[in-house]
Amino acid sequence: MTDWADRVDYRNYAIRPKMDTRNLLELLLVTLSIGFLAGVLILHSWVRTRIVSIGYEIQRLTAEEESLLKAEAGLSLEEETLKAMGRIEDIAQNQLGMQRLRASQLTIPSPRDTETDGTATLAMMRPLKSTAESRHPSSSF
């Protein structure tokens, strides 16, 4: 090994590697402070971005709500127009060839169409069984 130092006092034989805890602690503190500040800035930018995107979403939904309300109003008007009795009578007479009913054509339901207990008899309905018969199921339908 070659010694390049000219004099003995330039030689560093007594230097030993030693950890300086104070400097290491300061480095750690500065690094954590910078990391915390970076985290706060990233969180702030993320929150700000979310607020802006939610604002745009609210604006879009408000415009969509207004257009849907206009469409609802238009459909309500169209429904009332289609339900107009004059229009229905006009279509029935002109397009379908129907005529108004005469008084002799009206059919009034007779009281015999209803049973004595007040319920209407329906077509194709089987007669109701008594409660005694309903307790014992029969095999025939």
Image: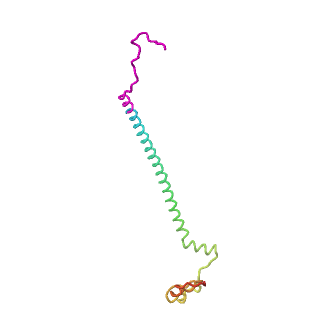
| Range of magenta residues | 1-28
Q: Is residue 6 magenta?
A: yes
- Percent x, y of residue 122: 56, 83
Give the residue at the far front of this rendering: 1
Quadrant where the C terminus sits is: bottom right
Image point (39%, 25%), residue name: 18
Q: Which of 9 and 36 is in front in this view?
A: 9
With respect to residue 56, does 37 lie above or below? above
Q: Does the magenta stretch include residue 23?
A: yes
Quarter of the image where one finds residue 90: bottom right
As drawn, is 136 to the left or to the right of 97? left
Q: Nearer the viewer, residue 93 or 128?
A: 128
Total marks in image: 0
- Percent x, y of residue 76: 51, 65
With respect to residue 54, does 98 lie above or below? below
Image point (39%, 12%), residue name: 9
Judging from the image, the colouring scheme is rainbow
Image point (37%, 27%), residue name: 20
Type of secondary structure dominating the magenta stretch: loop
Quarter of the image where one finds residue 15: top left
With respect to residue 112, does 29 lie above or below? above
As drawn, is 134 to the left or to the right of 99? left
Q: Nearer the viewer, residue 26 or 87?
A: 26
Give the residue at the far left of this rendering: 22
With respect to residue 5, does 141 lie above or below? below
- Percent x, y of residue 61: 48, 54
